[in-house]
Amino acid sequence: MELRHLQHFVAVAEDQHFTRAAERLMVSQSGLSSSIRALERELQAPLFVRTTRRVTLTEAGRALLAEAERILAQVRSAHDAVAAVQGVLRGTLSLGTEQCIAGVHVARLLAAFRRRHPDVEIRLRQAGSGALAEEVAAGRLDLAFAVKTQADTDQLRSVPLTRESMTVLCHPTHHLATAAALTPEELGGEAFVDFHPDWGPRRTTDAAFAAAGVHRTVTLEVNDVHSLLELVHEDLGIAVVPRHFGLKREAGDLTALPLKAASDTSYETVAMLPPPEATSPAARALMGLLDTSQEGG
């Protein structure tokens, strides 16, 4: 099995189209098709279902994709490791992050990394914590800053960044605004503003209410902090968020109240990485900068 066959296979799987994949790889379409056929013959299984408009993965193709991505990531890591030994850090740093993650100022960290390692191309992807964990485990990201969503595995480990409490935000005229603290039980009948279910703050809040056996209704679902704070400002709902969200300038005069629950409701942020032997030199260099230059985000 040749690496170029795997590279061609992954490109077709990503683009779901032979012509677009061939253009991206800068190879002829006939050459790309020949490469995929050679891989299918070797594996003795069809990898794609081909139609006039698109191609989709077969069951065998889906099984191969995860392994192919992992192999190619390890090959890139090997190249980068040799370059690092020779005193040159180069290649690509693929980073994922949730927005407004606690414990790291991502823009400042990447700026410091760029100054230190100008030959490394930086790629940034913002997504929810669950998706980021999958991307790191599959080798599509070198590391990610996110909320811890699972225990460490053979493909994924987590390095703690920080823990903080969860806070209830509401309009200062809201009937809850005069409380000293609130429990999930006291919030069950409220309308909530919250993030997409894969975002870390939403996962943390959902877990806290589930542990308390309290159903809650998210009537307004957003994908950015600014929109969430704006909706709470207009008294369209309340929000349960990490404590540092309430300290943002945009939070203005919103009332912030501690969330008290019987179960642990802390918001734990981590750096998600592959196992040490599979961690790229660029990821190790970024983590080294994080250790020395960061203050909470």
Image: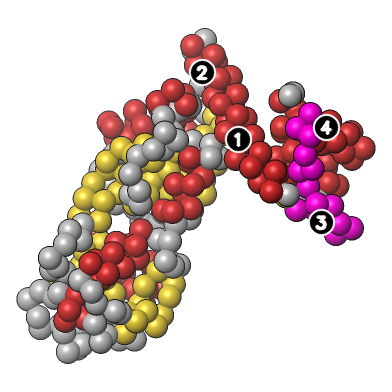
Residue found at x 23% / y 67%: 211
Q: Amino acid at mark 3?
A: Arg
Residue found at x 79% / y 34%: 44
Which stretch is magenta?
Answer: 41-56
Q: In the rendered image, which residue does mark 4 sit on?
A: 41
At mark 4, the secondary structure is helix
Instruction: Decide whether residue 54 is among the magenta residues.
Output: yes
Indicate left or right for 211 with 122 as reference.
left
Q: In the rendered image, which residue does mark 3 sit on?
A: 54
User: How far across and how far down the image is residue 129, in percent?
Assistant: 41, 53
Q: CA distance from mark 1 to mark 2?
A: 21 Å
Residue 287 vertical placement versus 169 (above, below): above
Disc number placed over residue 67 in the picture, else none: 1
User: How far across and how far down the image is residue 69, in percent?
Assistant: 61, 36
Indicate left or right for 64 with 126 as reference.
right
Q: Amino acid at mark 1?
A: Glu
Residue found at x 40% / y 69%: 195
User: How far across and how far down the image is residue 246, in percent?
Assistant: 24, 66
Label whose residue precedes the other's in the sequence (4 or 3)? 4
Label whose residue precedes the other's in the sequence (1 or 2)? 1
Q: Is residue 221 visible?
A: yes
Disc number placed over residue 81 in the picture, else none: 2
